[in-house]
Amino acid sequence: MRGDGSIQELPHLDLTPPTFPIDTPQWTAAMAASTPSDPTRLRLVTWNMWFDDRAQAQRFDALIVDVLALNPDVVCLQEVTPQVLSAIEASALLQSTYEHSPEPVSPYGCLILARRALRPKFANTPLPSKMGRSMVTCVVQGHMGTLPDVIIGTVHLESLNAPAMREAQLRACAAVFLPHANAVLCGDFNFDDTQAWGDWHRDRIRPLENDVLAVTLPDFEDAWPKLCPGVRGATFDGVHNPVCVADRNEVMRYDRVLIKRGQWQGISMALLGEHALDASGIKISDHYGLVVDCAVRDH
């Protein structure tokens, strides 16, 4: 979702929604070929799915294949539509491995899938918002209680030109995390760490909204610059994803994984969904996803 306000905020209503593929041979093959879950690690995926109806079924199928190939412990999704949720609920393959957060996603929202073996406990915290935004959280027991518990929250912070609202939302998230020694906040933050939206159109640069993180979440560390130093890591890229992103100048790191300085730390991280799905150039989403592996700190 762009940050400028020039596009429609709500998804197009389709009276004949696509039939989503479920439990395809590609899903089964991806899961079978994946590396077994490491009991000393926690693997997290976050991805804004893009609610647009263009090639929606094809993009959903490709996203699930990519996710299953990674065999993550927790999957945090944004811009999940009711049709996508129904497909997830109808998948025997997904349901056998994961539980999902119970909150409704109408017209779209955030969803967490967490490995059943981690005994997830879900909650939902409404955020200050004109768009009905909330933070979905999940407390997981690190591999059947052998590792420290951690609370994982996912958000789609306020879209458009709303820095004050996003700051209020981050403060609300911080209050939820306060009692927890170990926490992760991930999702679509709708601001970049190097520029404000539209700076490429202006003679004068606006203050950097990213500075709000040091104020609202001082105990958290942005995982990407730590684990991938010197790599831009743009997750919304009009240059390399022009079919899905209208403005070629919009190259932004909207999507984040913040890890609280506790017992868990990030050890590796990568972008997801950079490949085109067909000759049209369309990709899984207008956002790239992120995968991060976490481990318990050595003391």
Image (tube, helix red, strand yellow):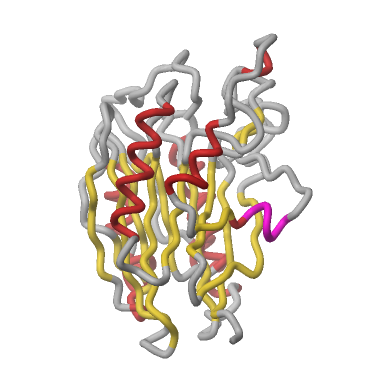
**How many circles with numbers are drawn on the protein?**
0
> Start and end of the magenta stretch?
224-228
Is residue 230 in the magenta section? no
Viewer-closest of 240 and 192 = 192
Q: Above or below — where is 184 with respect to 21? A: below
Outermost residue toward the right in this view:
230
Residue occupying image coordinates x 52% and y 47%: 214
The C terminus, quarter of image: bottom right
Residue 15 is left or right of residue 244, and the answer is left
Residue 186, percent across and down?
46, 52
In this rendered view, identify the residue nearer to me: 205 or 78.
Answer: 205
Q: Position of residue 112 (x, y in %)?
A: 35, 57
Q: Nearer the viewer, residue 220 or 240?
A: 220
Classify residue 179 by image quadrant.
bottom left
Q: Is residue 270 left or right of residue 62?
A: right
Tell me where residue 159 sits by quadrant.
top left
Q: Position of residue 110 (x, y in %)?
A: 34, 47
Residue at screen point 23% across, 37% down: 106
Residue at (35, 30) in percent of width and height: 165
Q: Position of residue 21 (x, y in %)?
A: 41, 50
Residue drawn at x 64%, y 70% is 267
Instruction: Decide whether the magenta segment is chiefly helix, strand or loop.
Output: helix
Q: Is residue 127 left or right of residue 203?
A: left
